[in-house]
Amino acid sequence: MPGGLTLVAGQVADRYDRRRIASICQLAQGLAACALAAASFSGWQSKESILAIVLAAGAARAFEMPTMQALLPGLVPAPLIPRAVTWSASALQAASIAGPALGGLLYAMGAGTVYVASAVLFCTAGVFIYLVRIQRSAPRREPISLRSVFAGLDFIRSRPEILGAISLDLFAVLLGGATALLPAYAKDILETGPWGLGLLRSAPAVGALVMSVALVCFPLQRRVGKIMLLAVAIFSLATIVFAVSTSFVLSFGALVILGAADMISVVIRQSLVQIRTPDEMRGRVSAVNAMFIGTSNQLGEFESGATAAWFGLVPAVLVGGLGTILIVLVWWKLFPQLVQVDSL
């Protein structure tokens, strides 16, 4: 995703109809899939064409993420936002599990078939989003300036509980990126083949999906700030167990717990950001949140690879897990406003 567009996307989401922006982004990604399908069927596909099409799809994705996050609170009453965030996260995890399997089945009929199916789904989603009706007052069109573009950053800095939640997730993902090393772990530590690697990759999503269903049935009511910090601590401990494990079953279980703990953190963070942000600022604040997520994921994978090259597989993941626990302890003292958040 072109990160340079993220802050601009937040500004656009606050100035224009979010429903139309999200619909256009889905249609743009559908057109990109159509282009890949046409290139695949005609045989003129090249590295340059693929990169150009993926760049266009990434630009649409940059506008889609903050817009969709800011759009959600307008669809449900405020008390139901945490549950809506949980349902959205559970749908994403279900797609993360079923999508690769379905893609593999479609790929048996050729790469073009996969692209066509993706194009149909993107375009269908674009139409459905366009048909959604939301109640939102006309957005205030303040003059575009550097101050308005960076207003999301200023707002987050003024709300310590939001800053603490977002930055905690950033550093947790940055240091606890064990999943980036799964191929090496599967081959060198657990000595398993492609099927084992596939199971290990799906384990965090399985844990996240189970936890999201549990949160829908039993939503968090009290002490959500402390629960978020404890969830990140459990994420860290699961990372440490995975680091030292030589048992496939234990490693799989640790990754399931890791995914479940991460889901608790995600639901609390996203709900906190959306509920405590005014509607006219949600696009820009969501853009900053999306930028932090994208940065932490990419830098976390780089950090995992670099430390593994320097110190070895096990020490790299172990240091990451221990570092994340240290971050939790520091954040507990540094952001008392986050610790004191009682309910969403």
Image (cartoon, rainbow, N blue to C red):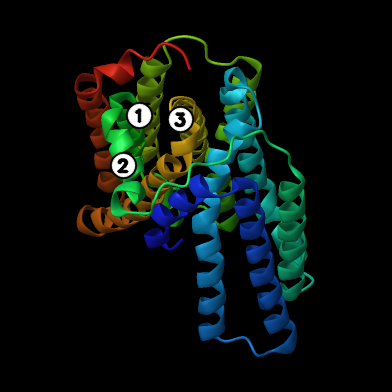
- The residue drawn where x is 27% and y is 30% is 158
Residue picked out by circle 3: 278
Between the residue at mark 1 and the residue at mark 3, the CA separation in whole angstroms equals 13 Å
Q: Earlier in the sequence, mark 2 or mark 3?
A: 2
Q: Between residues 202 and 243, which one lies in front from this camera angle?
A: 202
Between the residue at mark 1 and the residue at mark 2, the CA separation in whole angstroms equals 11 Å
Q: Which mark is residue 36?
A: none
Residue 303 percent location from the top left of the image: 28, 53
Do the numbered discs 2 and 3 sit on residues whose CB atoms are within 8 Å?
A: no
Residue 185 visible from this viewpoint: no
Question: With 73 as the anchor, is 337 left or right in this view?
Answer: left
- The residue drawn where x is 71% and y is 55% is 126
Residue picked out by circle 2: 153
* Up-down relation of residue 246 to residue 223 (above or below): below
Residue picked out by circle 1: 162
The three-letter code of the residue at mark 1 reads Ile
- The residue drawn where x is 76% and y is 61% is 105
- Secondary structure beneath dot 1 equals helix
Question: With 91 as the anchor, is 321 left or right in this view?
Answer: left
- Secondary structure beneath dot 3 equals loop
Q: Between residues 296 and 335, which one lies in front from this camera angle?
A: 335
Q: Between residues 225 and 325, which one lies in front from this camera angle?
A: 225
* Up-down relation of residue 251 to residue 44 (above or below): above
- Secondary structure beneath dot 2 equals helix
